[in-house]
């Protein structure tokens, strides 16, 4: 992994127009993770740096969304932890969060349930996203679900990505932590890539 | 389980109890709780040791408390001495005695009239102090209103509004007695870096101060000031360099 480009605190504030107070406030509210604050010694003493791409994207989101959501609600959204909520099948389909086909595939594997937890919904949501790319067959979708149900919990709290590969007609799914780089041989085709972290974030937005 | 309908725990002599859910827990003698405790009201006027986590709506310590796990409480008041080895999460804390935190403290309001030591970071919306604090990590605070009577310190201070003034309570009155003067620590706040939107400092030593509006009052020793909008400096303070950025 290439080390992310860093930006100093001073440059960050100049670039985004936010103040020291706002930055500290957002950190207190867990909108900016502790491990993005990288302390380094420079000739002017200690300075704090941030991973440039991540922090700029995050601040852009906060600035754009803070009028509609409270800081606490924003914090919940950015946390990679799954939300605690449950919805019924009808609610999920009526609110257009999940299509009926995806839901059906899921219940075939797990059986019908009264309500579905956020964790289960995220699996179906990811399945739905992949089905909608038109690159994946229903049969492959079943295997995708298996991968998620078996392994997604192991990556809890980390950023993760779902990768779909196809080689001479046979398909493989990989669940990897992100950001990561990967390379495949010529005969293997990278069919689709889906950020699970973004799925969690999107789903939280849709459910609130 | 509803805490209010749960039983009370009362230790008056010297005894050991396991953890659990209680309504009121009061330890007046010498008590040890061997597990996690979850209660509505926790009060200790004797000597208490909790080996697990302490979760209480209200916590008051008049005696000595040693909490080996985390302490989570809405309202905390310490008149005696409290030591926590874990993290502290508190809405409103009022410290008149001594409070030592081995890890970090997070909360809404912290009021200090006694002494607080935090070995990790301290993140609060509002900190009012008339007493003494020593923070090994970052003090991240919405509003800091500090009257300094003793030696106070934090590695870094960051926030919206940071106001440090020299206190005028007993500590300074006693300084007129020369014998005591020698053993009294100097009333001064020391930090490596202070960053905020609005900063007013008195009797402060810092390497770097960065802010939108910076006012350096009397008795300061500052290495470098970086300000955005406005800067003033008192004659009795030394500032090695000040530049507008």
Image (cartoon, coloured by chain):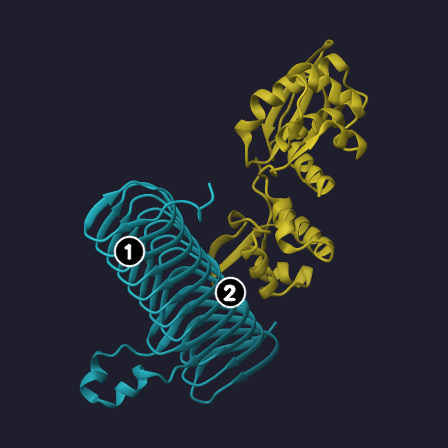
Chain colours: A yellow, B cyan
Q: Is residue B193 visible?
A: yes
In the rendered view, does B189 fall on the left or right side of B18?
right
For the residue pair B95 and B138, the one nearer the viewer reads as B95
Disc 2 designates what residue? Answer: B158
Whole-angstrom CA distance, mark 2 to mark 1, is 30 Å
Q: Is residue A67 above or below residue B190?
A: above
Which type of secondary structure does the marked residue at label 2 adopt?
strand
Disc 1 designates what residue? Answer: B65
Q: Nearer the viewer, mark 2 or mark 1?
A: 1
Q: Earlier in the sequence, mark 2 or mark 1?
A: 1
Q: Is residue B240 above or below residue A190?
A: below
Task: Where is residue B232? Give x, y as percent.
Answer: 55, 84
Q: Residue at x 61, y 39 (%)?
A: A83
Quarter of the rendering containing residue A80: top right
Quarter of the rendering containing residue B192: bottom left
Task: Where is residue A131? Give x, y as percent.
Answer: 77, 22
């Amino acid at each position: 992994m290439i080390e992310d480009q860093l930006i100093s605190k001073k440059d960050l504030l100049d670039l985004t127009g936010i103040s020291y107070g706002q930055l500290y406030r957002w950190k207190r509210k867990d909108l900016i993770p502790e491990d993005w604050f990288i302390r380094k010694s420079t000739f002017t003493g200690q300075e704090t740096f941030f991973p440039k791409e991540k922090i700029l994207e995050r601040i852009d989101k906060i600035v754009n969304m803070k009028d509609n959501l409270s800081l606490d609600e924003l914090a919940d959204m950015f946390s990679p932890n799954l939300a605690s909520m449950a919805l019924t099948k009808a609610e999920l389909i009526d609110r257009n969060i999940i299509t009926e086909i995806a839901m059906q595939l899921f219940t075939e594997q797990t059986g019908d349930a009264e309500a579905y937890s956020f964790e289960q919904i995220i699996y179906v949501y990811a399945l739905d996203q992949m089905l909608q790319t038109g690159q994946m067959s229903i049969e492959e979708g079943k295997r995708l679900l298996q991968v998620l149900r078996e392994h997604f919990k192991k990556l809890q709290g980390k950023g993760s990505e779902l990768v779909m590969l196809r080689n001479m007609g046979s398909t493989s799914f990989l669940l990897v932590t992100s950001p990561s780089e990967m390379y495949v041989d010529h005969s293997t085709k990278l069919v689709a890539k889906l950020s699970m972290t973004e799925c969690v974030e999107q789903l939280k937005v849709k459910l609130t | 389980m509803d805490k209010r309908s749960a039983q009370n725990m009362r230790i008056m002599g010297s005894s050991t109890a396991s953890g659990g859910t209680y309504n009121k827990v009061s330890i007046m003698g010498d008590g040890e709780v061997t597990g996690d405790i979850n209660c509505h009201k926790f009060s200790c006027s004797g000597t208490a040791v909790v080996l697990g986590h302490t979760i209480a709506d209200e916590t008051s310590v008049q005696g000595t408390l040693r909490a080996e796990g985390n302490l989570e409480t809405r309202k905390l008041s310490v008149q005696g001495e409290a030591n926590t080895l874990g993290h502290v999460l508190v809405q409103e804390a009022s410290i008149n005695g001594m409070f030592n935190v081995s890890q970090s403290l997070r909360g809404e309001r912290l009021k200090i009239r006694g002494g607080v030591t935090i070995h990790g970071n301290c993140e609060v919306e509002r900190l009012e102090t008339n007493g003494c604090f020593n923070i090994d990590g970052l003090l991240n605070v919405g509003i800091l209103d500090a009257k300094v009577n003793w030696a106070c310190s934090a590695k870094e201070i960051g926030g919206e509004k940071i106001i440090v003034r020299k206190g005028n309570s007993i500590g300074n009155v006693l300084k007129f007695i020369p014998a005591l003067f020698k053993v009294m620590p100097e009333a001064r706040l020391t930090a490596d870096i202070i960053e905020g939107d609005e900063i007013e400092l008195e009797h402060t030593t810092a390497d770097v101060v960065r802010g939108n509006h910076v006012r350096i009052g009397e008795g300061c020793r500052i290495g470098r000031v970086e300000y955005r909008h406005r800067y003033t400096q008192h004659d009795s303070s030394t500032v090695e360099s000040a530049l507008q950025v």
